Image (cartoon, coloured by chain):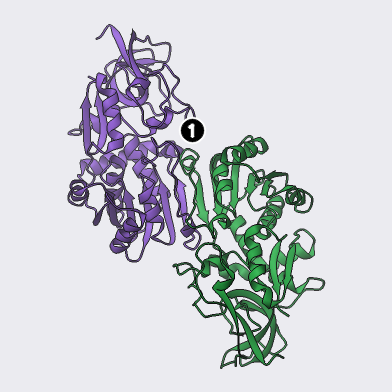
Chain colours: A green, B purple
Amino acid sequence: MLKENRRFRLVSRPQGTPQADNFSFDRQPLPVAGDGQFVVRNHYASLDPAMRGWMDDLPSYMPPIELGDAVRAATIGVIVESKTPDYPVGQWVAGLHALEDYSLGAPGGTTRRIEPAAGVPITNYLSIMGGVGLTAYFGFFEECRPKAGDTILVSGAAGAVGSLVGQMASLAGCRTIGIAGGPEKCGRILARYGFSAAIDYKGKDVKELAAAIKAAAPDGLDIVFENVGGIPLDAALLNLRKGARVALCGLISEYNAPERIGARNLWPLIPAHASIRGVLATEFMTEFPAARAQLERWLVAGRLKIDEHVETGLDQAYAAFMRLFDGRHDGKLLLKIV
Amino acid sequence: MLKENRRFRLVSRPQGTPQADNFSFDRQPLPVAGDGQFVVRNHYASLDPAMRGWMDDLPSYMPPIELGDAVRAATIGVIVESKTPDYPVGQWVAGLHALEDYSLGAPGGTTRRIEPAAGVPITNYLSIMGGVGLTAYFGFFEECRPKAGDTILVSGAAGAVGSLVGQMASLAGCRTIGIAGGPEKCGRILARYGFSAAIDYKGKDVKELAAAIKAAAPDGLDIVFENVGGIPLDAALLNLRKGARVALCGLISEYNAPERIGARNLWPLIPAHASIRGVLATEFMTEFPAARAQLERWLVAGRLKIDEHVETGLDQAYAAFMRLFDGRHDGKLLLKIV
């Protein structure tokens, strides 16, 4: 056990793209559990686009990260000290903690004990059974209301959420079209994630991408699962069928932009009687245990595949986080802390 | 009865704002009813923003107006020749016809016979019991899913649809905030349409308008009924409560713009788990008779007020139509043909 707690802290709010000097490391004495708390040795942290939002001082579904605090992140680790009876020392635990060696935790919220199933890597409990899997699950099944035979377009299809949504849509009997960047990712979403068709967005403007979508889905789209925003979203909106559902899960193209981008082509929502709805998995928190059990069953049965890209070392937190925004990762981005 | 049929025709497709030379008049022989058809002498036509969309060669919920054809419009008039038994000569009839003296019509679609209630002006059957009333009714009750106590923001609140939505929202027990242009319209939506609060959008950018909305609705908006798009929509999206519903009824700010405008602030849909949905009253066509009966009851009981702005003369069609886009009309814009 270390004597000190290294923390990757937010020291100033990014304007656009986060810079290295928005962050700094410090070392603090180890946290001490109060009554009802535990201390977790963080082994892995999930690096998620949502963290970029928490760095802004804007109202959202949770408060911003305070300046000077360690950067909030979902982590998985082992309890090393406990003053809460159901969370004993030695227990694997996942929760919303921070990019640091040790975090104070407590039962409640998204905190949960992990009992890994045989043959399932512990990191899967931070990816497919974590926020990414739940976001894909509730975003797809609740917001997209899929019917067998529906045609779905997924942007960011090679990403963690996108690849899971594509596979879930296949399980639901949908025809799946994925948008990804470059031939390698397009090949992978076909071969590994079972998409019916792949479109490379690189070098295409809205009109060109809309034409490529129309070629892949001549009768239009019943469902759009949007992770990217900007050009892919505007192109998708030009291809809606009557009654189409657009699940707005992420807008990674604009998180570091100086201004919001949004969508220009809202007009087709009217003649298509279509909707755009934000995906917020935490609205379904009471259903998380059942959803995780379903995800674990699919995983163990080999019906869902999850890829993880693991960067190593808390000291690499900034460089690892930035991989979220330039596509230099394949699957769920994780940081190995120990 | 005239010997000829004057027609206000579309002769070229507008690029941006329609120009006078996109249209021309001609005179044709009177139409002759075939089997199952009637000829209607048009008395009034409804001038609607949707007509601008029909002038473009774009896929929509109905085909574009063909070049050379009279401009499609909802009209109300009296049958002067009939070869269909339930639509006799002398019958008032409303339907989707055109800006011309005489139209060929047939039962089906939105065509319907009118039996005016005592004391109700015939034009009300083209406004409140026509597309405007039905759009307000289904847009509000179906897409906004109102609950008593909800706070609703209506843009274009002094307009035909907006003024009706505000009154229906009051009937449903909602708190109503209207956005309108200038002190006269703001005063009118308070005094005549019973809005709880009025905001003048003129001279305000997104940030300033968002602040004015926040001042009027400190706890945020449960419902947004959007008729305008652009700045009002972007400002509304910064004030959504959890679970907010945005009914997208119109985007009049962009119909004549060189490019679509859309919305920049889609991001708040995610943390608010909110939705934007297109309003398309024709999806509820089987419920139109019941809705018209309800609207007529409210109208006769004085619980709904509709204002109509009537321009006179088919030869004034272009100038009258352009009033849709510059706010120079109070209430439903109609053209009196005879």
**Residue B205: image x %, image y %?**
33, 53
Above or below: residue B131 compared with residue A89: above
The front one of A105 and A219 is A105
> Is B118 left or right of B151, judged from the image as shown?
left
Q: How many marks?
A: 1
**Residue B92: image x %, image y %?**
28, 23
> Is A78 left or right of A50, judged from the image as shown?
right
Question: Which quadrant: the N terminus of chain B?
Answer: top left
* Residue A86 in sight here: no
> Is B129 left or right of A272, judged from the image as shown?
left
Q: Residues within 10 Å of mark 1 (few under 14, many from 20)?
A: some
Furthest residue in direction right, as rendered: A119
Q: Disc 1 residue type?
A: Ser
Element class at badge 1: loop
Residue B223: which quarter of the image? bottom left
Q: Residue at x 67, y 43 (%)?
A: A149
The front one of B21 and B336 is B21
Q: Residue at x 39, y 47 (%)?
A: B230
Residue A216: which quarter of the image? top right
Q: Chain of mark 1?
A: B
Instruction: Please give the residue where the numbered disc 1 appears in the rendered image.
Output: B60
Question: Which quadrant: the C terminus of chain B?
Answer: top left
**Residue B225: image x %, image y %?**
36, 49
**Residue A241: image x %, image y %?**
56, 39
Q: Residue at x 68, y 50 (%)?
A: A181
Residue A32: which quarter of the image? bottom right
Above or below: residue A317 compared with residue A221: below
The front one of A71 and A295 is A71
* Residue A90 in sight here: yes
